[in-house]
Amino acid sequence: MVTGAALLLTALPSAVAAASGADPRPAAGSAPTAAQTLGADRPAAGLLRAMQRDLGLTAEEASQRLVNEAEAGTRAGLLRTALGDRFAGAWLNGRTASGLTVATTSSDDTAAIRAQGAEPAVVDSSLDELKAVKEKLDSATVRNRAGSVALDAPVWYVDVRTNRVVLQGTSRAAAERVLRAAGLQRDRRVAVRVSDEQPRALADIVGGDAYYIDDTFRCSVGFSVTKDTQQGFVSAGHCGQPGSTTAGANTAPQGVFQQSVFPGKDMSWIAVNSDWTATPQVRGAGGSLVQVSGAVRALVGASVCRSGSTTGWHCGTIQQENVSVRYAEGRVDGLTRTDVCAEPGDSGGPYISGAQGQGTLSGGSGDCTRGGTTYYQPLTATLADFGLTLTTATPESTVPAPETHAADAWVKGRVYAAGTTVTYGEVRYVCLQDHQAQSAWSPELAPALWKRL
């Protein structure tokens, strides 16, 4: 165990209802809550109904869960910053996500964790150590007798709840072959899980809203984006290659794939023609429209809902992050695993937690009759890799950004990872949660996302 210094943390304001459409500048002497910043205090009615159906909640419980998840994300970010290399992960629990657990490698941190309203878990390995173990699995390749990459140990990830790296195989023998190839067969930080799950990319030759690729395949629109003045949307990489043409659900000409990555990652973006307009909306239950306010990454245990052109709107929870999956077409890293169901044609469709975009459907197993497991490509990674700006319903701030000449000056539209430091004006801040910056979320206006140093 590592002995940690005393931690100084900033208390968060209690949740207060925000007036719709209010100027994002906080009133004198107050700051917006995390729920207000992320739009969790004003969820779409269709999203709440789907959460009630799929998570077994009442309307009041669904609303409270969204607020709790938003506030917990900021608390976890503050503790991650304070714990440094002792941080070993954070996750939510409870029917309304009222419980936040934060893991540390030092028992000296427990009082400070409790002071932030979280339950401490003292563990052996830090998150950085577990990520290093997973990287060894990333590098291991096992082939079958035909010389093809073996697909009988297709999933591996860091499980913060158990403080282990989990390797999932169709048999223990299959998993042990991979462990030997990675030099991890005696590593106590690795656990084996036997499952018959065989994830597959979910774009079949039949396909938010549907779109059609080269008049052959169908996938689902992810999120609206812009690049400079060009409008478009993101989707899954396995749905098409650069140059592939698309048609909308109405079969009218729509756009062209600009960039696409698969395998390795599973992301793409499509530029649309002038007949199409980007909106901050995704298709919810019963055809209702859900507004997207931003791209703030949710915690493990948070609720998440998915929209797709085959199965519509379904909800569940986030199970693990930074998951590696080996499809028949190749390995994809950095995915997020959920218990939300999906079927072919849903590929590329959006996942949302509250009003925050989370990612686009990559693949999975099972179906929406029996239930299943799905994996999504995190939205922040797609935005960062392709230099895209998410189209959102968050109003622009009327507060001008101060002139800053520092090399690490905060920049609107940039994707920031938790732990990144920036300069805003003459003040230094540290990022608490992965997100894409918006003018309404500048460091001085968004204590849910930034902590002043």
Image (cartoon, rainbow, N blue to C red):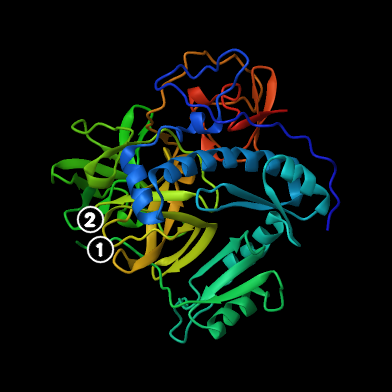
* Res 409 seen here: yes
Residue drawn 40% across and 34% down? 390
Read off the residue under disc 2.
218
| Badge 2 vs badge 1, beta-carbon distance below 8 Å | yes
Image position of 304 (left or right of 216): right
* Res 357 seen here: no
Question: Is residue 5 or residue 148 the one in the foreground?
Answer: 5
* Amino acid on which the number 1 mark rests in the picture: Asp
Query: Eyeballing the image, is 325 above or below 392?
Result: below
Question: Is residue 242 or residue 318 the one in the foreground?
Answer: 318
Residue drawn 40% across and 22% down? 20
* Amino acid on which the number 2 mark rests in the picture: Arg
Task: Measure how far apart labels 2 and 1 are at the Cα level.
Answer: 7 Å
Q: Position of residue 266 (x, y in %)?
A: 41, 55
Read off the residue under disc 1.
204
Residue drawn 69% across and 21% down? 427
Query: Eyeballing the image, is 40 above or below 257?
Result: above
Image position of 347 (left or right of 143): left
Q: Position of residue 344 (x, y in %)?
A: 28, 62
- The kind of secondary structure element at disc 2 is strand
Image position of 122 (left or right of 230): right
Q: Position of residue 331 (x, y in %)?
A: 47, 65
